[in-house]
Amino acid sequence: MPADTTWLQWVRWPRHRPYVGSCSDLTPLLPHAPQEEQLHGRLVVLGTPGSESSRLCCKARLLEQGAFAGIDAVLALHPASPAIGCCVAAGSEGPCQWLEFRFRGAAAADAAVLAYWALASGARGVLNGAGRRPCEPSSCSESQYVLLADNDAQLQERRRAAEDVLLGTAKATGCLLECRFGKPRPWPVFNTALEQLFVAQLHKPGVASAWFPCCCGRWCGAWSDWGSVSRAMPCLRATYPVPGAGGGPHSRSFAAAAATPPALRATLDAAVALAATAAQILGLRDIRDIEQLAASAHPAHH
């Protein structure tokens, strides 16, 4: 099993015979779905680019470009460490907004550094251009940032604060400012109804539910940049613990624990439960009847 694997499963309703998409990771997970006479639908499996880049909002961009057109529900699965749980991912799934700016003038490099220190508490950024030699000061500096927040209201406040910082820096250094903000990405919606369907599948006979202690009461964390997608359709981002993993999914200890039979068993059990959840969704007459999932279960959203 790869140390860090992400699966996106998209469920849609075609007019033709059932089809179950698969990849190397999911081939053994849905052996019986095509045999169900009343199961009509299509499962599309896609690994999204830039998932581990967190705030780059690749899933939101896919949504804007039509990749989710005709999709009724989105289900995903991600490994986690039992010692950490799923809430550690909250730092990468919150609201965010891209920011690019450029200072022009004799003090362009100084302006970029001042802005960096002023924005550091609520953003992450890099200076892409501010000169290459100490004896040749650059007259232009470029920076890229991502504004971070704990909720949608705080993101708006941090954008206003960033505007004040940049305007003040430009005035203090005598530089000309060019600035561009990207689209704001909202806090994700946690679908409690889909979560309940998934947890119920985990506790059915044949599934090693001992591997799945409830992580802080929810199974839908650890999906970066999914706020926009979860506003468009019902979503579940389930996490499951890898036995023996002591660090995060990108650590060496996690990779070692992931290459063991217990980890493979946990992965297969979680994936089978997720596939069964997808089958339940396909069996619903009207997928939009479960739109109560769209009510956020996270207080930071309100």
Image (tube, rainbow, N blue to C red):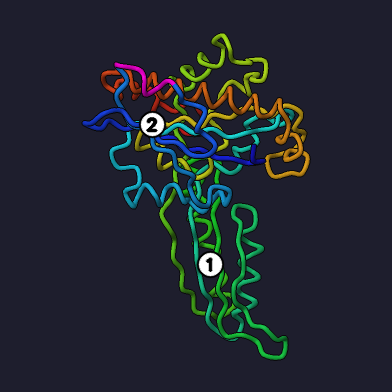
Q: Is residue 54 above or below residue 29?
A: below
- Is 288 in front, or is 270? 270
Q: Residue at x 70, y 86 (%)?
A: 133
Q: Secondary structure at mark 2?
A: strand
Image position, residue 258 (x, y; %): 70, 35
Horizontally, residue 134 falls left or right of residue 228, namely right
Q: Residue at x 77, y 44 (%)?
A: 252
Image position, residue 65 (x, y; %): 33, 52
Q: Amino acid at mark 2?
A: Val
- Is 86 in front, or is 177? 86
Q: Which residues are magenta?
A: 32-37
Which mark, residue 20? 2
What residue would you read off at disc 1? 166
Rendered-image quadrant of the C terminus: top left
Q: Residue at x 30, y 16 (%)?
A: 37
Q: Does the stretch in magenta take in 291?
A: no
Disc on the earlier residue, 2 or 1:
2
Q: Quadrant of residue 11?
A: top left
Q: Count neighbours of disc 1 (C-alpha within 10 A) and say few if under 14, some if 14 to 19, many if 20 or more.
A: many
- Is 182 in front, or is 168? 182
Q: Quadrant of residue 6?
A: top right
Q: Is residue 224 above or below residue 171?
A: above
Q: Secondary structure at mark 1?
A: helix
Q: Quadrant of residue 70?
A: top left
Image position, residue 181 (x, y; %): 44, 61
